[in-house]
Image (cartoon, rainbow, N blue to C red):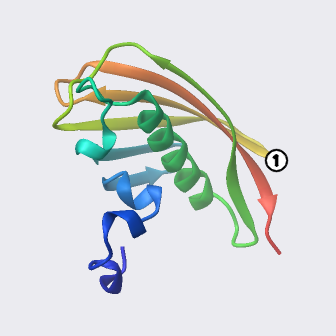
Amino acid sequence: MEPQDEDRSQKEKNYIECLNIEYFRAAGDHMEAKMNLTAFHGQPYGFLSGGVTIAFAETIAGYASNQLLPAEKKAVGQSVSANHLKPKKMGGYIIAKGRLLHKGRSSHAWSIEVIDDHNNLISFITVINAIIKIT
């Protein structure tokens, strides 16, 4: 987030800023990211929202793909398949660890495991990114 953006209210932030991603690391065909959980991430019942978990995975898969591409190309989400395996009570954080399954000219496929702060696998997500030319 840019310094001038620090004073914006929560309503003015885009969803990526609201995800509260603490870090993102990518090296070749692997990536990892951590998202700290706040009330924004929860369902009314006190559990992490599956939709937020999916948004987190799609966002970081896009970041990872874009690091592998030349400047004139960008990755955009094309397909997401998610399996939520265990509920996560609100609080703490989740970590996503991903591996590039396919790196083609027109698409990238990422396999992402999402674990909680007790090292429990909570979601398994596959993200397909379309690779587009932006010039």
SS at mark 1 in the image: loop
From this view, report whether residue 8 is shown above or below residue 77.
below
Indicate left or right for 66 with 93 as reference.
right
From this view, report whether residue 41 is shown above or below residue 111.
below
Estimate the x, y position of residue 59 in percent, counting from the top left.
51, 49
Q: Residue at x 36, y 46 (%)?
A: 33
Query: Number of marks in the image?
Result: 1
Q: Tell me which corner region of the image, top left, top right, bottom left or bottom right, holds residue 15.
A: bottom left
Q: Residue at x 48, y 39 (%)?
A: 57
- Amino acid bearing label 1: Ser
Indicate left or right for 13 with 37 as reference.
right
Q: In this view, which residue lies farthest toward the top?
A: 85
* Screen quadrant of the C terminus: bottom right
Q: Tell me which corner region of the image, top left, top right, bottom left or bottom right, holds residue 37.
A: top left
Estimate the x, y position of residue 39 in percent, counting from the top left.
24, 43
How many residues crowd around disc 1 within 10 Å: few (fewer than 14), some, or many (20 or more)? few
- Is any part of residue 41 visible from this angle? yes
Estimate the x, y position of residue 28 in percent, counting from the top left.
53, 49
Q: Residue at x 38, y 44 (%)?
A: 32
From this view, report whether residue 92 is shown above or below residue 34.
above
- Is any part of residue 37 visible from this angle? no
Closer to us: 33 or 70: 33
Q: Tell me which corner region of the image, top left, top right, bottom left or bottom right, holds residue 121.
A: top left
Q: Residue at x 69, y 72 (%)?
A: 71
Indicate left or right for 88 with 18 as reference.
left
Estimate the x, y position of residue 96 in percent, counting from the top left.
38, 37
Residue annotated with mark 1: 106
* Screen quadrant of the N terminus: bottom left
